[in-house]
Image (cartoon, rainbow, N blue to C red):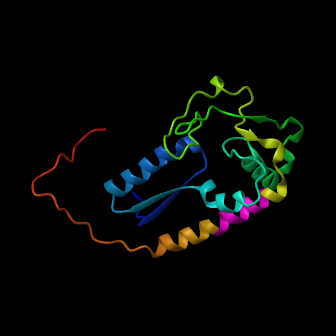
Amino acid sequence: AYHGFEKIVLVNGHGSNVPLVDTIARRTTLGTDSLCAAVHYPWLAMEAFNAIKETEVAAHADEFETSLYLHLAPERVQMEKATADDDVMGAYVSSDSTSPYARFNDYWSRWTDSGVHGDARAATAAKGEVIFEATVSRMLELVAEWRAWPIAERRDFHERPVQSRIRW
């Protein structure tokens, strides 16, 4: 925004950063003349991944992430160490904020010995290619839509001054 960009897209790839990146996008839009959107890239690939996945949980070092890594940098993946692990999941809350209802990111050491949430053993480079292609395709569509998004004039509907100097 400082350098004159009218529209910005922040791309996030870490689940616990979603609310932080959303807040940064919102504050950028409210505090500058720029429009700022936030996207969590895995969401762009979920429809394609759901059609090919073999396991239920997609969260961390799992079938999704390991497959993507196998596609992008297979020489860096040690599949002989692949494992399955889980978190604590309730009807509304999970310890890895994978619930659609309530966000909560616990200390991983409370519930996992491996750092895995899901099953990395189900990962394949072919699935990673599907994830990658879906992400790139949908990101291009998102950016095209965002570029065309209108920038309307701001209006102030307040009838009296507001406390605009609130320090967060």
Near-viewer residue (134 or 34): 134
Task: Tell whether 11 sits left or right of 7.
Answer: right
Counting from the top left corner in percent of width and height, residue 74 is at 85, 50
Task: Tell whether 41 sits left or right of 126.
Answer: left
* Residue 48 part of the magenta-drawn span: no
Near-viewer residue (10 or 41): 41
- What residue sits 38% from the left and 62% below the top? 34
Counting from the top left corner in percent of width and height, residue 154 is at 26, 66
- What residue sits 58% from the left and 33% below the top? 95
Residue pushed farthest right? 80
Of the 4 image quadrants, the one containing the C terminus is top left
135 lies above or below 106: below
The magenta-colored residue range is 128-137
Of the 4 image quadrants, the one containing the N terminus is bottom left
107 lies above or below 90: above
Which picture quadrant has residue 87? top right
12 lies above or below 16: below
Residue pushed farthest left? 160
Counting from the top left corner in percent of width and height, residue 21 is at 48, 48
Counting from the top left corner in percent of width and height, residue 51 is at 73, 61
The rendered magenta stretch, by its main secondary structure, is classed as helix
Residue pushed farthest top? 110
- What residue sits 70% from the left and 62% below the top? 48
